[in-house]
Amino acid sequence: MSRTIVLAYSGGLDTSVCVRWLADRGWRVVAFMANVGQGEPERDAVRRAKAAGAAAVVVRDLRREFARDYILPSLKAHAVYEGKYLLATALSRPLIAKHLVDVAQQKRAGAVAHGCTGKGNDQVRFEVSVRALDPRLQVVAPVREWEFRSRAEELAYLKRRRIPIQLKARSLYSIDENLWGLSIESGSLEDPWTEPPADSFRWVNTPREAPAKGAAVTVEFQQGVPVALNGRRLGLVALIERLCGIAAEHGVGRSDLIESRVVGIKSREVYEAPAATVLTEAHAELERLVLDRGLLHVKQAMALTYAELVYDGLWFTPLKAALDAFVNETQRRVTGAVRLKLHKGVCQVVGRRSPHGLYRKRLATYGKGGAFDQSMAAGFIKLWGLPYEGAA
Ligand code: ARG
């Protein structure tokens, strides 16, 4: 079997140690770096991978694909896990896995590797995705196997192996960042009673420090796709980036929750997802305007399933494809605009309109001259309640 292995490389300490550890076990290591909008200077990371012993480094800019094929389906489905997590990290994993497999096939590798621990969801997402895409590939998870029990032990190993690695200043938290959001964990956050300290957030302003004057935002959608922000047409990546800046400035998009992991544990998680929060609110509001009651309610129920599927690492499955087909069918009428106000941490929809809107003022009005024939309501209620007469 080929002794080439492709490692999902982030540039941090763990995956740098993974490079060395795999090389020490006879693997020819190809480090694969995915740019999903984490804003890491690539050059430094490439240098680190090489210093650690990577035979080759492959870098791919996946931001557009991430936005189009992962963020967008999830936005259309309103995937929010346990009511609070907009799934930024979870969505990036199948994309990275897909390219990991692609690079492995290109390089005729026999295996792929990732730097996840054995306690998290990400190992599940990577491995289930890789197996769905190419079951012949072996998967190695060094962090789950190796003997190091702390950062200090990892650093000592690199020192012993005379690997000079310049790492960024260590954050107090474990952070995963991409275009759609930021996941923050560990450090003092491990006490669920402790309020997240100000320094645990990277993007979003503390509401108290946000400008006293809020911001008005208009998002336009075409068949469920956000296409313009404040009247300006933008590609999805640029739109998300720009909206992220605005919402973050106004304190919108933080969440703090106890989360149920796939592997059975509860964990304390803090997230920042400013653009995701605003776009999900806006998109959901537009659907309230254009989808009929029955369809809207079925879709709302499916949002839970969709979120669970993304969280659980089941992206490359027939269920996901079938749900996408349903969701896409619902998006045909989701064209229009939504107005929102962002102010000191609050994101509020204040207006919506669509050429396919089902709102009819002449039916809804309490004012004079409505077209709704109220006399029909009495008969409707009689039949509606018929099965339940005396039921209680
Ligand atoms: N709990 C989240 C998830 O499972 C985020 C994991 C983020 N990883 C990190 N290194 N902070 O999707």
Image (cartoon, rainbow, N blue to C red):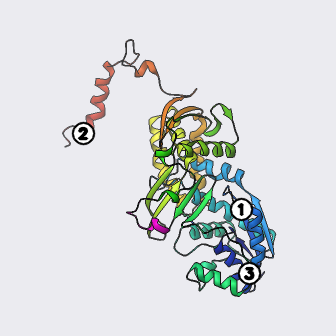
Quadrant showing the C terminus: top left
Secondary structure beneath disc 1?
Answer: strand
Q: Quadrant of ligand 1?
A: bottom right
Residue 193 in magenta?
A: yes
Residue position for label 1: 34
At which x and y percent is residue 381? Answer: 29, 29
Can I make out residue 203 in this image?
Answer: yes
Q: Is mark 3 within 8 Å of ligand 1?
A: no
Vertical position of residue 39 compared to residue 298: above or below: below
Whether tag 2 and tag 1 are in contact, CB under 8 A, the answer is: no
Q: Is residue 267 left or right of residue 138?
A: left
Q: CA distance from mark 3 to mark 1?
A: 23 Å
Question: 73 or 119: nearer the eye?
Answer: 119
- Specify the amino acid type for callout 2: Tyr
The residue shown at (56%, 40%) is: 330
Q: Is mark 1 within 8 Å of ligand 1?
A: no
Tell me the magenta residue range: 187-195
Circle nearer the viewer, 3 or 1: 3
- Specify the amino acid type for callout 1: Ala
Q: Is residue 195 left or right of residue 210?
A: left
Label 3: how many residues lie within 10 Å, few (<14), some (14-19) or many (20+)? some
Q: Is residue 332 left or right of residue 366?
A: right
**Res 17 → quadrant:** bottom right
At which x and y percent is residue 73? Answer: 60, 49
- Specify the amino acid type for callout 3: Ile
Residue position for label 2: 388
In primary-sequence order, the first of circles 2 and 3 is: 3
In primary-sequence order, the first of circles 2 and 1 is: 1
Quadrant showing the N terminus: bottom right
Whether tag 3 and tag 1 are in contact, CB under 8 A, the answer is: no
